[in-house]
Amino acid sequence: MLDNTDMHILKELTKNSRITMKELGEKVHLTGPATSARVAKLEDNGVIEGYTIKVNQVKMGYLVHAIIHIFTKSTNHQPYLSFIKEQDQFVINNYKVSGESCYLLECKFPGNEKLNEFLTGLSNLVNYKLSIVINK
């Protein structure tokens, strides 16, 4: 069971996972070693699954950010999943969802030409509805 201190630690790590244990301890009113032990326990218990970085996709050359609702044509989703795996340089997230569509696919593309190539391949496997992200 997580207490308020654990929740505060998670909140601070979510803001900045590169914070030192000493700095984190000061924010949650613990010593550095006590904070480190709490974080290790959260990791061991699977509450903290890993640490990531946030990458600016535009600065990486991916100017088009697309959200694609996927509607599979059959109950066999494997061809779609294989296609997505092959196109991993463009895929940010692939969520299996309930509701109107079967999957919610988040992608990045350097331009409309690559987006069009991707959609052409995708349309051989599934139906889709495309939205382009204007701003976040």
Image (spheres, rainbow, N blue to C red):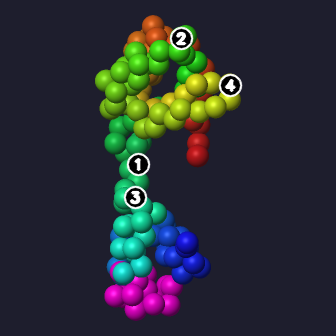
Name the residue that disc number 1 marks.
56
Closer to the camera in the image, 76 or 67: 76
Q: Report x, y in % for residue 134.
A: 59, 37
Residue at the location (51% across, 30% down)? 105
Residue 74 is labelled as: 2
Q: Earlier in the sequence, mark 1 or mark 4?
A: 1
Q: Which residue is mark 4?
A: 100
Spatial separation of the CA atoms under disc 3 and disc 1 = 22 Å
Q: Is residue 113 visible?
A: no
Amino acid marked by disc 4: Glu
Residues in magenta, as a range: 22-36
Dot 1 amino acid type: Asn
**Residue 70: x and y, percent?**
55, 22
Height in image: 136 above or below 89?
below
Q: CA distance from mark 1 to mark 2?
A: 36 Å
Mark 4–mark 3 Cα distance, whole angstroms, equals 30 Å
Determine which of the numbered discs, if any, sits on residue 49 in the image: 3
The reply to whether residue 33 is in sight is: yes
Q: Quadrant of residue 67?
A: top right
Residue 1: give x, y in percent of width and height. 55, 72
What SS does tag 2 mark?
loop
- Compared to 47, does 69 lie above or below? above
* N-term mark: 3 or 1: 3
* Earlier sequence position, callout 4 versus callout 2: 2
* Nearest to N terminus: mark 1 or mark 2: 1
